[in-house]
Image: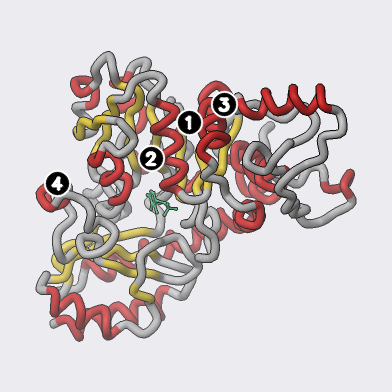
Amino acid sequence: MQESFATRAVHAGRRDFDLLGVHAPPIDLSTTYPTPNLEEAGRSFDSLGAGDRPLGTGIYQRLFNPTTDRFEQAFAELEDAEDAATFGSGMAAFTAVLLAAKSRGSHIVAVRPIYGTADHLLTSGLLGTTVTWTTQDRVAEAITPATGLVVIETPANPTLELVDIAHVVRQAGTVPVMVDSTFATPVLQRPLTLGAALVLHSATKFIGGHGDVIAGVVAGPHALLREIKHVRAMTGALAHPLSAYLLQRGLPTLELRVLRAQSTARDLAQRLAADPQVARVRYPGLPGQDPRGLLSTQMSGPGSILSFELVSDAPSALQRFISALTLIMPAVSLGSTDTLIQPPSMLTHRVVDADARLHSGIAPGLLRLSVGLESADDLWRDLAAGLRAAV
Ligand SMILES: *Cc1c(COP(=O)(O)O)cnc(C)c1O
């Protein structure tokens, strides 16, 4: 029988520790590796350059690093994937996925909303891709013979809308589907088990989990990871080995952190929804907010991010709300130990076309709350002070 997620999250990437005689992952900061046997080194170079594993020496850190590789193998195990690749940020990971997809076709089909900068990258066509924006029920008709990838994000940033992964996969046919699963983490959702080809995370968020590392990770089958690692070897958007070490340190506590923050978020979502100063709360765990019933099929819980709108969406009311907070930090990013809040239309989704923003539910007064590990009562006291100040 397969071990539980909790057990695997603690032990993944540590199974050779007895043999090595260590109790924490060794950190290897080498930029280069000795190549005493030139013929062997040449073969390893070819293998790594093509996105495969080293044949002996790692050659050079842009091609291979054992500390990063250790995290990647551990993370792949948690996503039920064959392999994973780490990058210098979530956006670097997304860039590599898009560049690799171009070998199949440079047309991308994407469901809005997604992370603001990812939207901006696709809309700008900077990487030589074109995009058709669609909804989760109209993916099939958006696909053309030139489509190389379908991109979805669920739960979506920042509206918390859930996208039915299996439904999108069925419509995509032979086109690979990439799921940005940053908000869910492998604790709550494993897209590859639902037919997605690739799962992507901004590891800056819950995976690192402590607000001190910026990184991205993509997991999936060998065939696709090979292409993605090939792009990484050429373009060089690596994560530093110290980042990989910190990401691995986040894994054993991932489930604890996600479940604790989720239980606080459920509580706060209910209290916000009941408050007369709040016009609307977006949280899949609230009644009526999971019309497709995905919380009983593709996700095991609604997570710890929620969004809400004040009765007044005047910028001055938002500013008074933010200024009254003493515990919750006004800042972008999410998935940290502490609670963070920000208005997406003014910050993270500022780069998204204004009409598209409104159309996908990102109202001017929407506030996104990333619930941390503080107590629910303390957080509520802070939010309540903000709500009183905003009146
Ligand atoms: C933050 C984020 C990204 C981008 O990741 P970076 O690590 O900031 O580059 C992508 N997708 C989602 C859902 C995010 O929250």
User: Mark 1: which amino acid?
Assistant: Leu
**2 or 4: mark nearer the eye:** 4
Check mark 2 vs ligand 1: CB closer than 8 Å? yes or no: no
Note whether residue 123 is visible. yes
**Picture quarter with the N terminus:** top right
Residue 192, label in figure = 1
Q: Residues within 10 Å of mark 3 (few under 14, many from 20)?
A: many
Secondary structure under tag 1 reads helix
Is residue 132 rendered to the left or right of residue 263? left
Residue drawn at x 89%, y 44% as measured from the top left: 19
Q: Does the residue at mark 3 contact the one at mark 4 (Cβ under 8 Å)?
A: no
Distance from disc 2 to disc 3, alpha carbons, whole Å, reads 33 Å
Residue linked to disc 3:
226
Secondary structure under tag 4 reads helix
Counting residues from the start of the chain, the first of labels 3 and 4 encountered is 3
User: Mark 3: which amino acid?
Assistant: Arg
User: Mark 2: which amino acid?
Assistant: Ser
Residue drawn at x 41%, y 73% as measured from the top left: 376
**3 or 4: mark nearer the eye:** 3
Residue linked to disc 2:
296
Q: Does the residue at mark 2 contact the one at mark 4 (Cβ under 8 Å)?
A: no
Counting residues from the start of the chain, the first of labels 2 and 3 encountered is 3
Counting residues from the start of the chain, the first of labels 1 and 4 encountered is 1
Where residue 32 appears, x then y in whole percent?
74, 44
Residue drawn at x 66%, y 52% as measured from the top left: 241
Residue linked to disc 4:
356
Counting residues from the start of the chain, the first of labels 3 and 1 encountered is 1
User: Mark 4: which amino acid?
Assistant: Ala
Where residue 370 appears, x then y in whole percent?
38, 64
